[in-house]
Each structure stands twice: as structure tokens, then as C-alpha cells.
Image (spheres, rainbow, N blue to C red):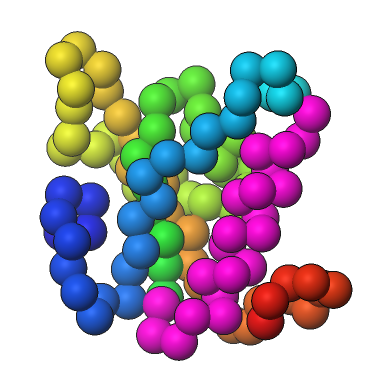
Amino acid sequence: EAMTRHVPDTPTVHIHVLSVHRHCRQQGKGSILLWRYLQYLRCMPGLRRALLICEDFLVPFYLKAGFKEKGPSGISVSNMQFQEMEYMLNGQAYARRNSGC
């Protein structure tokens, strides 16, 4: 349900957008932003997983970040199809300076 509507007080967060300016792509900045956000989510009590949907060409990026492919999403926009991805937030955040944890 978290993929289609807000469900308060659930253990799931849906990541809607990860965007990197076109001049800053292919520099690892998206990976760093995603990693830092996932670490932040690990600090949030009660959260157990993060979900997102992405186009097929982004699946390898998210797999490399630790997401698992759940399969085709039931959500589509015009003729665009998406894959649903899941990241389990088990355990504690990695201790890093300035992590906010």
C-alpha cells in the first residue's frame, strides 16, 4: 500500500525521487546521497524497509546499493513500466562521522 498512498505508522517508507543534476551524474554523487539517506532511515525507530519503483535501466544502480528486485510494479505512467525494489533496514546504521545517528 505504501507504493500508492500514505499509510501512517507503518514500517515502510517509499522513496519517491532520487535526482542528480545532469552535470553531476556519473560521479558517484547519487550513490552517496542514497547511502546517506538509507543510513538516516536506519536510525528511525519502527522502520523496517524502503520501497521504490524505477525504470528498468536503473535496476542495476539500485541492486548495487543493496536493494532487491521484487518484480514489475502495478504502477505505470502512460506507456512507462516500472520495477519495484525493496531495501531492508535491519540493524543499526553504520557509525560514521556526521551521520546524524
Percent across and percent down for residue 56 are 43, 24
Q: Which residues are magenta?
A: 27-47
Classified by dominant secondary structure, the portion drawn in magenta counts as helix
Percent across and percent down for residue 8 are 20, 74
Residue that appears at 40% across and 25% down: 55
Residue 31 position by quadrant: top right
Residue 5 position by quadrant: bottom left
Residue 5 left/right relative to 59: left
The residue lying toward the viewer, choosing from 24 and 43, is: 24
The residue lying toward the viewer, choosing from 81 and 4, is: 4
Residue 27 position by quadrant: top right
Q: Is residue 16 visible?
A: yes
- Asked if 80 appears above or below 9 in the picture, the reply is above
Residue that appears at 72% across and 24% down: 24
- Asked if 61 appears above or below 100 in the picture, the reply is above
Residue that appears at 35% across and 40% down: 53
Residue that appears at 18% across and 27% down: 76
Residue 94 left/right relative to 15: right
The residue lying toward the viewer, choosing from 96 and 87, is: 96
- Asked if 89 appears above or below 5 in the picture, the reply is below
Going by the picture, which residue comes out furthest to the bottom? Answer: 45
Percent across and percent down for residue 28 are 76, 35
